[in-house]
Every structure is written in structure tokens, then in C-alpha cells.
Image (tube, coloured by chain):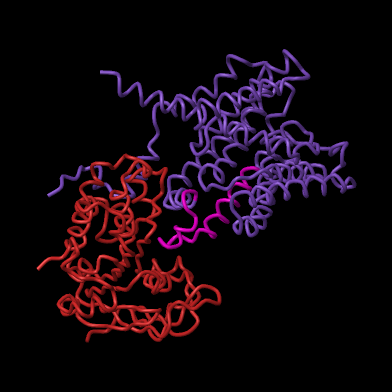
Amino acid sequence: MPDPLLAVRNVRAGYGEAVVLDDVSFEVAAGQSLAVLGRNGVGKSTLLLTIMGFTNLVRGSLVWRGEEIGHLAPHQRPRRGLGWVAQEREIFASLSVEENLTVVSRPGRWNLAAVFELFPRLAERRQVRGHHLSGGEQQMLAIARTLMTNPSLLLLDEPLEGLAPIIVEELTAAIRHMPGDSTLILVEQHADIALALTEHVIVLERGRIVHRGRSRDTLRDPALLDRYLGLTLSDSPHASG
Amino acid sequence: MATVSLEALRGPHGYLRAQTRWRRTEIAFWLATLLPFLLFPSYLQLASQIAITALFAVSLDLILGYAGIVSLGHAAFFGLGAYAAGLISKFGWGEPLSGLVLASTLAGVAGYGASVVVVRFRHLALIMITLGMGLLLHEAANSASWLTGGADGLQGVRIRPLLELFSFDLWGRAAYAYALLMLFLTFLVARRVINSPFGLSLRGIRENAVRMPALGAPSRAHVRKVYTIAAVMAGMAGALLAQTTSTVSLEVLSFQRSADVLVILILGGAGRLYGGILGAILYMVARDQFSGINPQYWYFWIGLLLIAVVLFLPNGILGGLGRAAAWWRRVSP
């Protein structure tokens, strides 16, 4: 296996005294994609928040490109190459689309032209203020804004939550069409879509990893999906052969 | 494949360059600031007061309009600058330019100190903290009458002629030229700051201070920087007032002055730089006229003006003008 871009080792983390994650370990190499699945409240979002430095890391280590980053302040982590799209989106409401993207931009292959290529809808609405965008457009903007920081690893927290099926398809296509060497950790309730978009998967239960494997193998294991996620793929509108 | 315009390809630096390009209206505005020398020579004292107030309002705009820091104690830095400039001249250093630099620097140091506390708070708590700081300084100056002159004001302020050539006379020619030049130079700095990556980050912080660190911007460090810059500018405005009028009274540190500059910025339009200048012109001219009509109750009209602007022009007069211009562009063939 190549050297990991990110290694999460024996992490125990939470909020204040409350522990949400316990003994979580996994690695992500450059160019790999990882789905993080689990039922509501098992610690999926907390895992991303911990990687970004917004929780209390009680034990364990976060190693980024061989460097321990567990002690770094949150604003220093995006500068190392970590890009996080929060579940809440939180775009800058009174700034235009272009200003939202320009506010945080850093040099790299992702520039205005590249993100507008990925999300043509944003190009059309370039001068529109954030609060005038639809939910789907806001989600596109949130992803595009993080891409403008030119991250080496993109952390997506439930990017498809609450979106209309047509927007889900559009966003899924955009994630699929990201350059092949993009590294991705995807937290998603739509397990079938997450598994179709990624190579590897971990499943969390009560803050611990209870399953890890290849996404395509997991997708073919309905018993496992039912056990940990309560998901019957044939019932899912996004299920595909 | 999506069609992406050339404008989009210009990137962030192209975007910032486009923002810093001087518009014809801006050039016309700055040329018009010279008109009082020709058209209103007997109002140059008032014009210098307007320029100083505009500089003070621009300094508040940096923190309120761009970084979202609501302050009800901004007069603390204005007053510090005024007292520093007055005391420097009283103790024998009457040269105005170096006095201005020293007074502004002192205000900046105080601003940096205050910023360490300010960055920890938002919203109502922040308003109370800044208000408290202003009140503390006002009472400290009041009680230290051996230094500040207390309620009687600072006595013995002697300012030498500007560049040893231009005296600050009753006509206000030197005062207006000096204040206008400083306003323009400081405005250039503020414009540069706002249209830089740092300035863009400030706007992000104003929108969502919690989200910005997740995107790589150190919100607290940025707020400390802009607060210090604003304090330097406010101190400069105070020092200009002390130097051009040769008087410093407790009023420079008063809550009233902090509230007035907030009103000025809201009238003109926060977050637009020119809003503070426009607000200062309107407020000072209105005050001059209203107090002439009714010396006792002129604040009634200022209050009425403020309510009207907030009701009908929520983004200030400049915001309203911008909206009208956008409407005109839409309807004109």
C-alpha cells in the first residue's frame, strides 16, 4: 500500500467530556476514496470534525503526510491541504457566488474556470447573492468554495442531504467527474450512492468501526447493509445494478 | 461542456484588480472635494470637520462594515489620538506631522490591546465590551485632570505651522487641506486593504466567523489586524481634530461621539467605504443647518433622518443609490 495521505490512529474524541468516537483507525492514500457509513448519531460527522480540529481529541493521532496534525488549530489544517464541506453548507449569504469562491481561493488547479466547468449552474449564477440560491445550488457552492482552497483531501459531510433527486444526480455526476487523483472521504446517508462513488468503506456503530472493506464488495452484501445501516437496496430509489 | 466566460477565467487576482480599478464617479468625487476652496471659502472649518469625521467613519466601516464588529466605543481611539496629539504639542513638540504619526501609533497600540479582548466576543456581548471600554477611558481621562485637564479640557495646545509654512488659522484653509490630504491617503490604504485577499477574508468573517477557520482563514488574527488598523485611523482622526482646532475636551472620548459615528455610517451605508464619507457630509451639514434653525432640538431632525433611512434605505443612502442605479440600468434601453 502506498504511504497514506491521512492516517487516523486509535482516535478517541468527542465534545467536552462526552466521547463520541473510540479507537477509530483507518488510512487514506492519495487518490483513494473512502465512504463513511452508519446510522444517524454514530459519529460520522464527528469524525470529519475531529480531522478538521473542531472536537476534543482525547487520545490517538492524526498523521497528515507523515506529520502529526492533532495539535494544529483548525485554520492551519486547510492550509496543509484538508478541505471540508460541512453538512450545514453555511455559504456566505450576502456575497455573490463569485465572491464566495474568491474569498478563500488559494493557488492550484481549482480556479474559477475549473469549478464553473464542474458546476455550470454556478457559472450562470455568478453574480447572484448566496441567499438567493436554491438548496442544491448552495450545496454546489459549498463544495466549489472548498475546492477553491485546492485541498489534497476533500471531506464531504452528507452533501446530498435534503436535495431533490435531480440535484442529487447532478451533484453525484460532479463528484464522479472530479479528477482521477482526487482524494475523498464521503460521509453520506445515501449508502448506495456513497458506495458507488468510492473505492473503500468503513461503517461506524456507536463511535467504533464495525466494518471495513471495498465499496463494491459491500454493495453486494445486502445482509451487511441491512445489519448496520438498516438499508434494503432494492427499496432505495438510487439503487442501481 | 459548459461555456465559461473570459471574466471567470481572470481568477481571484483579476477579480481584486477589477475591484481596485478607479471609476469615473470616484475620480469626480475626489476632485469635487477641492471645490470648497473655491465655492465655500468661509466654510472651510466646517469642511475640515467633515473630512475628520469622514476619516473616523471610514475607520469604523473597516471593522463594522467589513469585519462585522459592532462597536459602541470607537471614540476611545479617536479620543486617545486627540489627547496624545494635544499632550505631545503641550509638552513642546508642536510639529503636526510627526505628532500625527505618534498619536496614531499610540491609538494603534491601544487598539491592538483591545482587540485581544474584542476577538473573543460577538453580537450583544461585543457591543457591551466596546461600550464599556469607551466609558472606562472617558472616566479615566476625566479623573486624570492633572494630565488631561478633566472637564475643563486640555490647556496649552500649541501646533506649529504645517511644514513650517501653513498656519492653522481661523479661515481653515490649512486645516481643510491637511485633513483632506490625510483622509485621501488613509482612504487609499483602506481601499487597498479591502480589495486584498485579507479584505476578502474579512468579508467572509463578517458573514460567518466560525466557518472561516475551516476554510483556512485565522479569523481571530484577521480581526486583531483590522481592529488595530481601524484604531490607528480613528486615532489619526482624533489627532487631526486636536491639531486643527488646538483644543481637546472630554467630548472626544464621549459615548455621544461613538454613537454619532455609528449613525453616520448607517446613514451613508456600511461596508462601502464611501458610505462613511457620504454619511459624514450629510450628517455634519444637516447638523450645521438644523442647529442653525433650532439650536436646542436639532437632534430631533437627525433622529427623523435616521429612522427614514433605516426604514426606506436599509443599506444606507449609498445602498439606495446603488439600487436605483441598478434599476436604471435594467429599464434603460
Q: Nearer the viewer, residue B102 or A201?
A: A201
Furthest residue toward left:
A241
Which residues are drawn in magenta? B206-235
Is B225 colored magenta in this rendering?
yes
Q: Quadrant of residue B291?
A: top right
Q: Position of residue B274 (x, y in %)?
A: 51, 33
- Residue B72 located left or right of residue A171: right
Q: Percent x, y for residue B74? A: 67, 44
Disc tally is 0
B179 to the left or right of A99: right
Quadrant housing the C terminus of chain B: top left
Q: Residue B326: give x, y in percent of width and height.
A: 36, 26
Residue lying at 41% horizontally and 27% vertically, measured from the top left: B323
A222 vs A87, left or right, is left
What residue sits 41% from the left and 23% below the top? B324
Q: Is residue A215 above or below residue B163?
A: below
Q: A60 or B64, which lies in front?
A: A60
Q: Which lettered chain is shown in purple?
A: B
- Choose between B194 and B260: the one closer to the eye: B260
Colour applied to chain A: red
Examine the residues drawn in magenta and state their main secondary structure. Answer: helix
**Above or below, comparing residue B57 to residue A12 in the picture:** above
Q: Position of residue B199 (x, y in %)?
A: 46, 49
Q: Is residue A210 magenta?
A: no
Quarter holding residue A90: bottom left
**Which residue is at a point 42% across and 81% down the rendered structure image?**
A68
Camera-side residue: A26 or B283? Answer: A26
> Outermost residue toward the right?
B146
